[in-house]
Amino acid sequence: MSAIPGFLKGNFRSNESRTCDTTGLPVCNTASLFIQLHAVFAVVFLLVGAVAAILLALTRWPAVHLLPADWFYRVLTLHGVNMLLFWIIFLEVAIVYFASTSLLNSRLFSKGLAWAGFLLMVIGAVLVDYIILIGGADVLFTSYYPLPGHPFFYLGLILFAVGALLAMINFLLTLHIAKRDKTYEGSVPLVVFGATAAVIIAVLTIATGAAILIPTLLWAAGIVDIIDAGIYRVVWWGMGHVSQQINVTAMVSVWYFMFSLTTGAKPLNHAVCRGAFVLYILFINLASAHHLLVDPGVSTAWSIWNTSYAMYLAVLASMIHGFTVPAALEIAMRKKGYRQGVFGWLTNAPWGNPGFSSIFMSLVIFGFIGGITGVTIGTEQINIIVHNTLKLPAHFHGTVVGGTTLAFTGLAYYVVPLIFRREYYMKGLAKIQPYIFVVGILIVILGMQFAGSTGVPRRHWDVSFAGSPIPIPKMESGWLALVGVGGVIAFTGLLIFILLTVATVFFGRSNKGKPMESWGDVKDVSASAGAWTKEDEHKTPGTWALVSILLVSFVVYYFSNWKALADVWWVR
Amino acid sequence: MSFLIPEKDWFKAPDKGERNWIAIGIVWCLIMSVMMPYWHVAGKQNSRGESYKVKPEDFSARVQKFVETNSVGKLGNIPIVQPNPGGHAYLMGGGYIWYPILKLKQGQKYTLHISSTDYQHGFSVQPINMNFQILPGYDHVLEITPTSTGEFNIVCNEFCGARHHVMTGKIIVE
Ligand code: HEM
Ligand SMILES: [Cu+2]
Ligand SMILES: [Cu+2]
């Protein structure tokens, strides 16, 4: 294994590993089994969430208004839970199992632990979905106290969380044995560092989750009645917000990983990138306050401290990655000879490679939409004109969908050929899949954003308010049609991904013993591009152009929201 | 490569480009941090979270008393209630209605007490788009001064059960 820099003798048992025919990295067969199991289940839950998504989009489109009210809230619960928890966390377990084994030249610590974690996650998730579908938990994924959910709903969530915790422990113990057995020398790769940050945040999340879900389970079962609606929200968002930070951290790790894999990009400065990951760990666990900015009982001082000190340092971390990730790409492309103008490196990037295009669009959507809107609407006073309007889902469909989900689907275009060792069906379709999904989700976000600006509520079945005790005019809802139209397109994009992936995983052409077929590489044309100097290693005019546009958009969006706030009645 | 063991001497100070960007980021974060306390001093729209613990039945009784003393009419069978300018007003979310209908005067300050008798609700005044979270057990106190006249609609924008979407209310400002 000496071909891989820094790797010493692996700690694999006999016949427990193979060498990847494409990358030369070692693959632990046990880890590989569990990467496959978790990835398959992730995609199954993505399908459940996607079917729910199209039903929701078609219901919020007033001209269609598909589902009856009770099913709308039921399917909304299903969508939130399956997308935000099951799809994302199953895939994250697959990612951390991969990072701790193949990238550290190690075997997975324990097969038993992996089975236990996996089974608990599956049992928990299936139980939760079953309870939701029989109408036992029309409480949405936040299950705000005192909405009554069936005790098994909370029990299922707890089982799922315990399963995920076992997987995280397995990851940490794998890091430990890799170190102990000296399978590598030097520092862990950046991607493993990022995955470790994600796992540390995950352990914190699950601990907070236990603090809220266990008392809620006992309450739902009629054993105790000690919960307070305000405290429930504080602790619930301690879990709910922090868990989003797992997604950000994992997504950023995937960005680094995929840009290296598809274009050979290297981090310019490890200290900066790692420092930014450390900021995530240190400063995010306090940031739940931005969900409570217009709550009773939450003091101004606490909100400001919590959003500015805690959140802005995590925001700074994202801004740093938002620079270092494209900069690494730019340098790699320029070094390969693409030096024309400010953006020649970008226009010549492998846009036909779904593993690349997904990741680049994830970076842009996360930064320009998810990031800017999130920081702005999470500002203490601005939240008054945003709280629980559709601007909220507009924001997080820019983070967890256009950001995390898009990055994870892009990753799959490499996981399937490398770990499942099968070649994708219909590569032409796969190449355009990310674009279809992105167009759809951008339209959804646009519709939600503008409907939300006019006050249209989220989590609402009927903005005509028919049958209300106090009749009020129906809300102008032209923008809601965009949620419907975009939803159809985004659903189509996701469905193409799911069908191609499932078909390939089970029936695709095997590529065992051969390198995977390329999705389209970047040709090295540096020979004709002139000398590459030491100075060029730090010149990133394209990245500067991108981050300047980002900053200007940020400032404009931020202050235009302050301006909109200034028109509201005086309130304090 | 981001996924390979880095060279031994990876620890380097950030170069000029990175330093500049980090500095810009810090300055921007500081500006955003200062905006919030600044708005508490200079701005007119703030959320202080002032609230008092209250039992739903006690709050309900206060609302009832408020309606009896200040009622000025009815819309259907829902009372329209006009608090004294500068005085206290009460609004109760529960049973899929914001109760009662309030009648306020433009430019006057009111101390508005809002609570829930059942689940969590979202107090959302449209079309001015002012939103606050309302919880059972908490008397959420807002000092509001309507700056525009007309009929304003209250919707509920926190899911509160099967008929959440019919939960409405009204504020009339003269
Ligand atoms: C085809 C793609 C998708 C479409 C069309 C879509 C559409 C929607 C719609 C219409 C809503 C309801 C908004 C409301 O009325 O409050 C919603 C809620 C939500 N979506 Fe999606 N979505 C998609 C994908 C995703 C993904 C991939 C995730 C997460 C990874 C996600 C996470 C959520 C969450 C957390 C909610 C809020 C649920 C709640 O309020 O309880 N969505 N989505
Ligand atoms: Cu959050
Ligand atoms: Cu409601």
Image: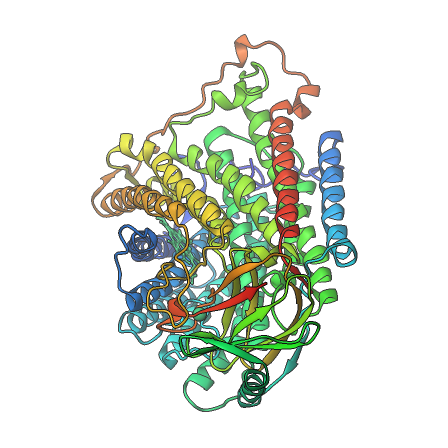
Decide: is A406 above or below A80: above
Q: Is residue A116 visible?
A: no
Asked whether, in this view, residue A482 is left or right of residue A537, the answer is: left
Q: Is residue A132 visible?
A: yes
Asked whether, in this view, residue A11 is left or right of residue A56, the answer is: right
Indicate the quadrant of ligand 1 in the picture. bottom left
Residue at the image position 39 percent from the left and 44 percent from the top: A409
Q: Quadrant of residue A386?
A: bottom right
Where residue A441 appears, x then y in whole percent? 40, 43
Q: Quadrant of residue A22?
A: top left
Decide: is A243 above or below A502: below
Where residue A172 appears, x then y in whole percent? 55, 61
Residue at the image position 70 percent from the left and 69 percent from the top: A299
Residue at the image position 41 percent from the left and 87 percent from the top: A221
Where residue A119 appears, x then y in whole percent? 35, 68
Where residue B172 appears, x then y in whole percent? 54, 65
